[in-house]
């Protein structure tokens, strides 16, 4: 009987260990970039996700039914958004949930969290898109906030930090050069690494995130002394309006250059132009590239929202965006 009890205990311990490994415990998983692939616990994986607004209301359990792996979180008021504690009312009258609470909820649903700074103070003019980062009035203060994020989450490997959302003008008329991109992105990378945070860092492309040419010219040099870097490309009109053969060629050029890329945003509408994301998504899915849709939101009046107010796929005047992304997310990978 004693030996039977011991055997049962050993079986129980084994089952518990397996359930922890396979269950909703991303915080105990390891994530790293090896070559041009995301690895989870030593194995190359393709992860799909969606941009989310959990800073305004936590709760990611609804993303599970879509088989999503990543919540790329919109942080629109970096200056005031708390790291921990209870929700606060910011200076704009918005209630903001603590970043740790957002992460904990995502983790309970087996979601990796990407914390992305979208804006400095919750005001339209402070949004991190189309701006020359080092020329913003909040540049120095932002780096301090970025360091506080990095310090707090450095022992939580399922929390990745993106250093900026969509830097520089779409037309490069702000004095942009690839050398400036390299210098600025290196400075932001160093802000995170100097805290001892070794988690995956996302580095956005130029031209408001849509230009990959900077990666082909500077990407490998950037990776020479920097580890666990994932380059973020946003796929809107500069991608979705291209012929399929051009899209495939551009993606293959990045793969051939051994550059780790992630499509951080893709949606059918940008700057008032309705596009068809399906050819692009089919191409990157077939090439095992990870990506996240814009936007996990319950509002059929927003053409980029993935859901209706009733929680159904949103297919209103958007090339059936909700059903399209739902179908792709549920594919075997």
Image: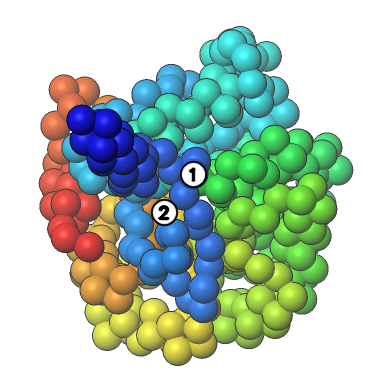
Dot 1 surroundings within 10 Å: few (below 14), some, or many (20 or more)? some
Residue 30 visible in the shown view:
yes
| Secondary structure under the numbered disc 2 in the rendered image | strand
Quarter of the image for residue 309 reads: top left
- Residue 28 circle label: 1
Q: Quadrant of the N terminus?
A: top left
> Badge 2 is on which residue?
265
On the image, the x and y values in percent for residue 305 come to 29, 38
Q: Residue furthest right?
A: 140
Residue closest to the eye, 178 or 41: 41
Residue closest to the eye, 48 or 246: 48
Marked residue nearer the N-terminal end (2 or 1): 1
Quarter of the image for residue 122 reads: top right
Instruction: Name the residue rendered at 57%, 83% in the picture.
Output: 216
Quarter of the image for residue 225 reads: bottom right
**Closer to the observer: label 2 or label 1?**
1
Instruction: Name the residue rendered at 26%, 68% in the picture.
Output: 285
- In the depicted structure, whether residue 225 falls above or below residue 330: below
Instruction: Name the residue rendered at 86%, 43% in the picture.
Output: 140
State the separation of the CA atoms marked 2 and 1: 27 Å
On the image, the x and y values in percent for residue 215 come to 58, 77
- In the depicted structure, whether residue 65 falls above or below residue 227: above
């Amino acid at each position: 009987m004693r030996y039977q009890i011991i055997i049962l205990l050993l079986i129980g311990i084994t089952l518990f260990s397996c359930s922890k490994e396979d269950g909703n415990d991303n915080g105990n998983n390891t994530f790293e970039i090896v070559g041009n692939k995301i690895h989870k616990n030593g194995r190359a994986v393709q992860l799909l996700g969606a941009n989310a607004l959990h800073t305004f209301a936590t709760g990611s359990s609804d993303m599970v039914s879509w088989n999503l792996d990543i919540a790329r979180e919109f942080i629109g008021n970096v200056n005031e958004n708390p790291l921990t504690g209870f929700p606060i009312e910011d200076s704009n009258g918005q209630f903001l949930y603590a970043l740790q609470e957002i992460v904990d909820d995502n983790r309970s649903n087996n979601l990796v969290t990407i914390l992305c700074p979208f804006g400095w103070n919750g005001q339209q003019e402070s949004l991190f898109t189309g701006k020359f980062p080092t020329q913003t009035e909040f540049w120095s203060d932002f780096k301090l906030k970025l360091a506080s994020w990095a310090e707090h989450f450095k022992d939580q490997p399922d929390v990745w930090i993106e250093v900026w959302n969509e830097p520089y003008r779409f037309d490069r008329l702000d004095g942009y050069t690839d050398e400036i991109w390299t210098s600025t992105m290196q400075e932001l990378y160093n802000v995170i690494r100097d805290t001892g945070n070794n988690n995956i860092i996302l580095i956005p492309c130029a031209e408001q995130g849509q230009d990959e040419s900077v990666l082909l010219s500077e990407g490998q040099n950037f990776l020479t002394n920097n580890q666990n870097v994932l380059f973020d490309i946003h796929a809107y009109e500069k991608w979705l309006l291209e012929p399929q053969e051009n899209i495939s060629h551009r993606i293959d050029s990045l793969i051939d250059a051994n550059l780790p890329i992630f499509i951080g945003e893709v949606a059918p509408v940008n700057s008032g132009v309705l596009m068809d994301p399906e050819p692009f998504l089919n191409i990157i899915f077939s090439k095992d590239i990870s990506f996240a849709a814009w936007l996990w939101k319950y509002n059929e009046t927003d053409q980029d929202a993935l859901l209706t107010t009733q929680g159904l796929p949103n297919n209103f005047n958007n090339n059936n965006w909700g059903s399209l992304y739902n179908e792709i997310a549920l594919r075997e990978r």
